[in-house]
Amino acid sequence: MRGDAVRQEIGTKKPRAVDIYVGSRIRLRRNLLGISQTELGERIGVTFQQVQKYEKGVNRIGTSRLLRICDVLQTAPEWLFEGAPGPKPKQSAAARELEAAFAAFLADDTAPRLIVLWPRLPMKTKRLLTALLAEMLRQVDE
């Protein structure tokens, strides 16, 4: 039964709530900047009718076009999705742990230096350093 519901949703021509929401955010931003649908269309390579369909959520927007729209509207893609309807993903314990570790890393004064140096290291050295750090932590935890 669930499969039938998914197939029906995929095959429907009805706009999805998230597409309508993102389209409304595009329209809001475009109007705040004083850009017409025609101008936005010209700058992203589509007709003003296509812009209308994007803004109403009738047509979905591909990734590269969405990035062009964001460039013209001088906004980040995530702004278009802030507050969007739909399921909110629950983070797993592993994801929360990784996020906390990354936040701690960024808060460390030595992190910027490591970020600059790391790409210049040979892969073998990276593996050895990672193993060394893991072993040092294992000994500290004992």
Image: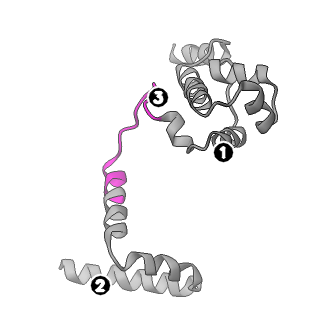
Give, as a single range, the part of the protein colored magenta: 82-98
Secondary structure category for the residue under label 2: helix
In primary-sequence order, the first of circles 3 and 1 is 1
Q: Residue at x 61, y 44 (%)?
A: 74
Local packing at callout 3 (Cα closer than 10 Å; few below 14, some 14-19, many 20+) is: some
Colouring scheme, one of rainbow, by chain, secondary structure, one colour:
one colour
Is residue 92 depicted above or below 13 in this figure?
A: below
Q: Residue at x 42, y 28 (%)?
A: 87
Residue 85 vertical placement versus 135 (above, below): above
CA gap between label 3 and label 1 equals: 20 Å
Quarter of the image holding residue 142? Answer: bottom left
- The structure residue drawn at horizontal position 58% and vertical position 84%, both measured from the top left corner, is 120
Residue 81: give x, y in percent of width and height. 50, 34
Q: Position of residue 123 (x, y in %)?
A: 58, 82
Residue corresponding to mark 1: 71
Could you tell me how far apart the alpha carbons at marks 2 and 1 are, in whole angstroms?
45 Å
What residue type is disc 1 on?
Answer: Asp
**Label 3 vs label 2, nearer the camera:** 3
Whichever of callouts 3 and 2 sits on the residue coming sooner in the sequence is 3
Disc 3 element: loop
